[in-house]
Image: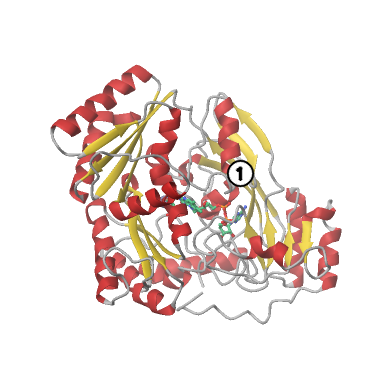
Amino acid sequence: RHGSSIPPRTESFTKVTKDHVAHLRSLLSSETSLLSTLDGSATTDELVSYNDDWMNKYHGKSQVVVRPKTTEEVSKVMKYCYDEGIAVVPQGGNTGLVGGGVPVHDEVIIQLGNLNKIRSFDPVSGVLVADAGVVLEVADNYLAEQGFIFPLDLGAKGSCQIGGNVATNAGGLRLLRYGSLHGTVLGLEVVLPDGTVYNHLSKLRKDNTGFDLKQLFIGSEGSLGIITAISILCPRRPKAMNVAVFSVPSYEAVQKVFAEAKDHLGEILSAFEFWDKQAYSVVRKHQEELGGERKVFETEGDFYCLIETGGSNAEHDEEKLGGLLEHLITSEIVLDGVLAQDTTQFSSLWSLREGIPEACGKAGPVYKYDLSIPVGEMYEVVETMRTRLRDRGLLVGDGNPNGPIRAMVGYGHMGDGNVHINIVANKYTEEIENAIEPYVYEVVAAKSGSISAEHGLGVMKAPHIHYSQSDVGIGLMHQIKKLFDPKGLLNPYKYIV
Ligand code: FAD
Ligand code: MLT
Ligand code: ZN
């Protein structure tokens, strides 16, 4: 970490010894469920993928990774750590973008990958009950076979876990259509810090008996308990899916396309994403390096937007989308447009958007900002930040491969009022971080936006929560944390500090 320094280790937390490791091992049914450098069952290198985050920005120093196979094992491990005063960090697929899923110091990592069973699926109600460690794409493929769809989709679907998705309240690419996990998750099974199992795998849509406790865990980023299973309402998979991508001359045009898309497509609109020409350039360069396809648009633009439709009647949907396309082209709102003709083209058009985070990651170390701002003012923040970095001489033009900043891109979930800014550096430096933070948060707060739309707080934004929450709100959060985790052993140094 640079700039804002790493919080110091809490000295009252117990340092894990060889004896602790031996005891933890005795709680698990399988030899392979525990990896530790303390008893020689793993080397430091073998623990790197658990200690380092997806961006390679945050680096923990844990010597112990526990991979329980059942909820009962999670419970025993948690109880033991709680009694012994050992701090722990829950980890799913380790695709989080705020340093929440890796240790800050030497916390024991509890990785959920071995809890990976689908428990039940009801094809009448669409309710899926599954272990937290099921990979999102595996869950969605399972549902596809039954004609259903997981109500969440995101670029990390091949690695992230459904428990991690609920823990972060991930938003992603389908929120516009299916809403947030706060609406679709019906129940949870959670192991509390002291090992108590809160079993509330409800399949009910309506239940007004007392506080809706599951909501506290959705988006709690592993600060209140370890989610071991989820129950979620899954919609029917649309029988017909279409995607179109447009190049447009300005951000105003993106907004016009969005308004027209809602008007023409109504309930079949399933995603509306946008990105700027700088993001397009980074993603195309990366795809070309991988041997990717020829030019996509005859006329390129300053902005791009992607529209996805999903409905039950292919002919009807195509007619609606065709009508929209014709209108956008004849009224000269868009410069150019491509409509997917087959499933390969469907994926390759989506990859122009979904591939942006990976392409940025390949281009260099990335500073990521994930902001909620009213749609009309959303792109102003990207421009304000560009001006600031240019004024400081850190960004030259749109970026320079050898300069401090190689690229700076804006993209996001237009339909949800969520913009992502990725600043690709040559290396992570205090100078760059201090030029961006906390200024970017001040700009967002001045627009009454949120400094974390969907990625969460983790270790990155924990010290900045006050830009989006009141003192009263933060005070209540501290009280809730204390109620669940009086010793502060679960995922320390993060979320609310
Ligand atoms: P991890 O990264 O392992 O953990 C994330 C947090 O949840 C940590 O605080 C961890 O302690 C906690 N946690 C994990 N599992 C559990 C559990 N079972 N119980 C309790 N706590 C737990 N996010 C979006 O919202 N929208 C996107 O479109 C999106 N796209 C992405 C695209 C890419 C390429 C990448 C790399 C990330 C993207 N993300 C997106 C970030 C997103 O938060 C994660 O991908 C995902 O939701 C995290 O799941 P995970 O299993 O990897 O969790
Ligand atoms: C996305 O929308 O692509 C994700 O939130 C990931 C990211 O911004 O890096
Ligand atoms: Zn996103």
Which corner quadrant of the image does residue 386 belong to? bottom left
Residue 346 on image: x %, y %: 41, 32
Residue 219 on image: x %, y %: 50, 55
Q: Left of 322 or right of it: where is 41? A: right
Q: Amino acid at mark 1?
A: Val
Disc 1 marks which residue?
Answer: 135
Residue 174 visible to the viewer: no
Residue 288 visible to the viewer: yes
Residue 488 on image: x %, y %: 62, 71
Asked whether 141 or 277 is in front, the reply is: 277
Compared with 148, 335 (above or below) is below
- According to the image, what is the colour scheme of the structure? secondary structure
Residue with the most extreme left position: 331
Question: What's the residue at 51%, 51% (across, down)?
Answer: 215
Asked whether 302 or 158 is in front, the reply is: 302
Question: What's the residue at 73%, 55% (across, down)?
Answer: 67
Compared with 100, 404 (above or below) is below
